[in-house]
């Protein structure tokens, strides 16, 4: 009797479930979407009077441009670290901005978290919304993912005020630790017709330079490191004094002294992205502001060889000269006309660049460094490098003996050697860049030992000293000859003038 009763019960249950699913399918097929949404809304409102729990949804995408929500990404990073041990169903993927494999909870997985004695539940859900375009048959239903946070209503104040702030802060820190730093470059504006496409292209930033490997005096290194670290921890200070959280660095010195290496060391020290801005590819000041808006915080904006990028040096002096000479202005205009025909011409002005550095638009974002490099600092407009725009000026000069010792440790793993005394004497007398020193210390074959590399450097220093001595001797000789010939010229000129005067006086007599 029991088996038949159980069979009938299961049969009835199965039939009921099948009937319910059939009715629900009919409702979804023929009932308007707006009517179903209205029914769900009032059902949830009715259940809210009896349901003691509160739910908060954090969606993956929001806004018109379908930009991924930063809150969603922070929650995802927080849960990947704090709940991956308790979840039973996980998914592993390589994040877009991550260098490690990320474990996160799978869809519809439920995990529990505790905060100050309060228990909360996280669920990763998704919803399907039909496309409302005219061609619905060509576009499938859009899938929208969201995290759903559930907690008891008696913990409302603590969860909304403290817990969510804790989750976002921890999630952002986890993303910064795991993110893959990038090197960006800008492209000409005419190549980006779609507003959804970014004006920057990037590759992974993997430059190995650090301050420990730079050929620089230890005191100067420590000063720069302390300045950078102090800046990165001064968010509250900049807010208190009413100044945008940014700082400008001017790196200047002869070619080969390590300006680009310094930028890479800054990025590795602070874990910042690098935006290498090519001014000649920027169409005008408006596009320059758009590029600034699309940069992120924790980044370094670099303009290398600022004196060569555009004609931004001494513009005010040139304008004064043009007003005094119309013919010269016409000739200059004719020379510039062929350049303006091409797409590569840029109309970025000195005023636009100054506003880019410290104007109103420069306050967007935060924690940003702006770095200029130049070989000839005297060519730059004083307004461009004044304090407040370029806050710290760093001169990278020729290699010193302390810098050589750093390079010897890097390339040859030598802290001391008997040849160091000779090198010290020569390097104090000769101007040689760290790049030239490094090239001579680098082994050229498997047979090159440290002694061979040091001998190559000594030979290069001696040749450089010989060239400098010869150049100085030639310069002295030319100066002596010029000083010696000047009186003879005056003597040669004087007699004819006297003869002319005598000839002129003869008719009068």
Image (cartoon, rainbow, N blue to C red):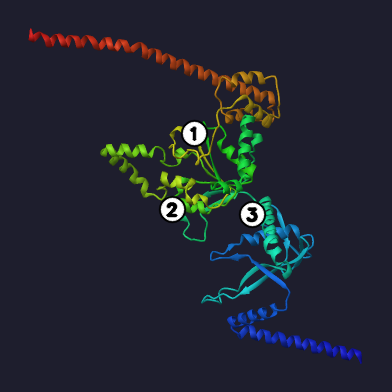
Left or right: 154 as drawn, with respect to 257 = right
Q: CA distance from mark 3 to mark 2?
A: 29 Å
Quadrant of image for the C terminus: top left
| Residue 44 drawn above or below residue 154 | below
Residue 152 seen anywhere in this rendered image of the structure: no
Circle 3/circle 2 CB separation < 8 Å: no
Circle 3/circle 1 CB separation < 8 Å: no
SS type, badge 3: loop
Residue beneath disc 1: 375
Q: CA distance from mark 3 to mark 1?
A: 35 Å
* Label 3 Cα crowd, 10 Å radius (few <14 / some 14-19 / many 20+): some
The front one of 360 and 301 is 360
> Which residue corresponds to the image point at 64% horizontal and 18% vertical from the top-left?
422
Residue 158 seen anywhere in this rendered image of the structure: yes
Instruction: Find residue 286 and name its label.
Output: 2
Instruction: Find residue 97 and name its label.
Output: 3
């Amino acid at each position: 009797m029991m088996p038949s009763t159980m069979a009938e019960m299961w049969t009835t249950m199965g039939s009921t479930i099948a009937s319910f699913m059939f009715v629900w399918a009919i409702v979804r097929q023929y009932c308007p979407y707006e009517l179903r949404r209205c029914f769900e809304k009032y059902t949830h409102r009715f259940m809210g009077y009896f349901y003691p729990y509160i739910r908060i949804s954090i969606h993956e995408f929001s806004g018109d441009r379908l930009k991924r929500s930063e809150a969603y990404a922070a929650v995802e990073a927080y849960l990947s670290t704090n709940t991956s041990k308790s979840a039973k169903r996980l998914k592993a993927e390589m994040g877009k901005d991550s260098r490690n494999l990320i474990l996160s909870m799978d869809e519809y997985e439920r995990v529990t978290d505790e905060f100050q004695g309060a228990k909360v539940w996280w669920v990763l859900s998704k919803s399907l919304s039909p496309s409302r375009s005219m061609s619905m048959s060509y576009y499938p239903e859009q899938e929208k993912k969201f995290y759903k946070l559930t907690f008891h209503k008696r913990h409302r104040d603590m969860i909304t005020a403290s817990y969510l702030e804790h989750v976002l802060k921890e999630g952002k820190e986890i993303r910064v630790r795991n993110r893959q730093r990038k090197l960006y470059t800008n492209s000409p504006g005419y190549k980006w017709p779609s507003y959804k496409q970014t004006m920057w292209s990037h590759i992974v930033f993997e430059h190995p330079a650090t301050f420990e490997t730079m050929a620089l005096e230890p005191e100067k290194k420590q000063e720069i490191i302390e300045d950078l670290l102090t800046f990165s921890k001064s968010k509250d200070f900049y807010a208190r004094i009413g100044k945008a959280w940014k700082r400008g660095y001017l790196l200047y010195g002869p070619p080969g002294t390590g300006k680009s290496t310094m930028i890479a060391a800054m990025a590795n020290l602070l874990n910042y992205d690098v935006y290498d801005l090519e001014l000649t590819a920027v169409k005008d000041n408006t596009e320059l502001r758009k590029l600034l808006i699309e940069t992120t915080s924790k980044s370094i904006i670099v303009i290398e060889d600022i004196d060569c990028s555009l004609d931004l040096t001494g513009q005010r002096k040139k304008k004064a000269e043009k007003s005094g000479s119309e013919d010269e202005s016409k000739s200059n205009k004719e020379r510039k006309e062929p350049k303006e025909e091409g797409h590569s011409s840029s109309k970025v002005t000195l005023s636009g660049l100054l506003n880019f550095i410290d104007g109103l638009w420069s306050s967007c974002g935060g924690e940003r460094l702006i770095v200029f490099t130049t070989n000839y600092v005297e060519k730059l407009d004083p307004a461009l490098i004044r304090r407040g725009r370029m806050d710290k000026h760093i001169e990278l000069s020729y290699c010193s003996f302390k810098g050589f010792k750093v390079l010897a440790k890097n390339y040859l793993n030598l802290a001391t050697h008997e040849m160091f005394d000779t090198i010290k004497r020569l390097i104090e007398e000769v101007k040689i860049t760290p790049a030239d020193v490094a090239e001579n210390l680098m082994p050229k074959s498997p047979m090159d030992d440290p002694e061979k590399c040091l001998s190559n450097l000594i030979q290069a220093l001696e040749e450089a000293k010989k060239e400098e001595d010869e150049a100085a001797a030639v310069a002295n000789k030319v100066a002596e000859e010029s000083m010696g010939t000047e009186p003879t010229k005056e003597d040669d000129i004087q007699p004819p003038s006297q003869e002319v005067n005598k000839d002129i006086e003869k008719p009068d007599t």
